[in-house]
Image (cartoon, grey):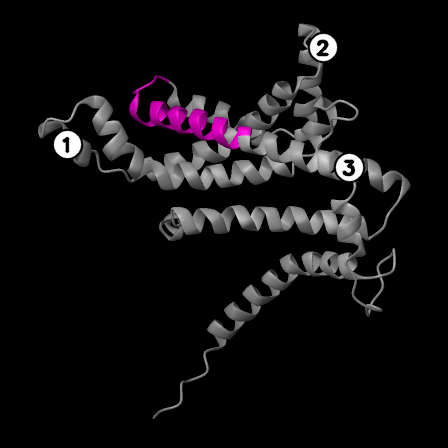
Amino acid sequence: MSRRRFDPGRAAYLTLNGAIVAFLLTPIAIIGVFALNPTPYISFPPVGVTLRWFDKFFTSPEFMNALWLSLQVAVAVLILSMLIGGLCALGLARGNIPGARILTACFMSPLMLPAILTGLALFQLYLLLDIGRPVWGLIMGHTLVAVPYVLRTTLAVLHNFDRRIEEAAAVHGAGPLRVFFEVTLPLIQPGVVAGGIFAFIVSFDQFPISLFLVLPKGETLPVVLFNYMKFDLDGAIAAASMVSILMAILVVVLLEKTIGLKTYVKL
């Protein structure tokens, strides 16, 4: 059996990718160590292992209320962004709308503007309209920056969409609604759901917009963590961060188990 020849290019490629992955995962590893460390400060090597900071996080009414609010807002944003982004993508790809590229750029513009300026602008708008800072206003702000993710992934699917499949269904007697729900929707589902995953994560971890649109005693988890760090910095912050990371991973795993995500790799 011949020994495989050493390929310098492949070795350099794997080394570079390994270094990038390590660079991305190192902060998470540091947070994990901090969350399990008994001391209220980062120390290396760790002096032990404890769950006291997770206990502090889950027994704190302030943290739990913020976590619950963040989850409610993120779920609402997930649903709204999938509906709005999916329908807008269909309209832009299929509607023969004049200036469709300009409209697409307008829909993507919230990603080009710093989120803190978006939050400030929405705060000023709500003040001018005298509507205060309701929860639905927070949801609208998060949806504004989440829709572009769904729009982009859905347009990617529609770009390679074979219209002959819909035409074949129509020829065989299927009406427009049946064609949409039984042919079009299942085929664009990968793009819509992939964008929805990003929308949920972006909303759950959204800080700049939330900072301007939340009320005292009605703050999302990122805002509560920011305020907490002003006066104290202990392992509870790291525990909350680990919960947020695990929440995002859980969403991806649940979607993989329920509908499968392997087909989304093409996006």
**Comes first in the chain, label 2 or label 1:** 2
Looking at the rendered structure, the kind of residue marked 3 is Pro
Task: Tell me how far mark 1 sits from mark 3, CA to CA.
Answer: 54 Å
Q: Nearer the viewer, residue 82 or 52?
A: 52
Of badges 1 and 3, nearer the viewer stands: 3
Image location (x, y in percent) of residue 129: 66, 6
**Comes first in the chain, label 1 or label 3:** 3
Image location (x, y in percent) of residue 50: 79, 62
Q: Residues within 10 Å of mark 2 (few under 14, many from 20)?
A: few
Q: Is 32 in the magenta? A: no
Could you tell me which secondary element the residue under label 2 belongs to?
A: helix
Which residue is rendered at x = 87% and y = 39% of the image?
Answer: 230
Task: Tell me how far mark 2 sits from mark 1, CA to CA.
Answer: 50 Å
Q: In the rendered view, does 240 fall on the left or right side of 176?
A: right
Residue 159 visible in the displayed image:
no
Could you tell me which secondary element the residue under label 3 belongs to?
A: helix
Q: In the rendered view, does 88 fall on the left or right side of 204?
A: left
Looking at the rendered structure, the kind of residue marked 1 is Ala
Of badges 3 and 2, nearer the viewer stands: 3
Tell me, for residue 61, which label it has, or none: 3
Q: Nearer the viewer, residue 102 or 242?
A: 242
Which residue is rendered at x = 83% and y = 67% of the image?
Answer: 44
Whether residues under marks 2 and 1 lie with C-beta atoms below 8 angstroms apart, the answer is no
Looking at the rendered structure, the kind of residue marked 2 is Leu
Task: Tell me how far mark 3 sits from mark 2, CA to CA.
Answer: 30 Å
**Residue position for label 2:** 127
Could you tell me which secondary element the residue under label 1 belongs to?
A: helix
Magenta range? 76-98
**Residue position for label 1:** 169
Residue 18 visible in the displayed image:
yes
Image location (x, y in percent) of residue 117: 69, 25
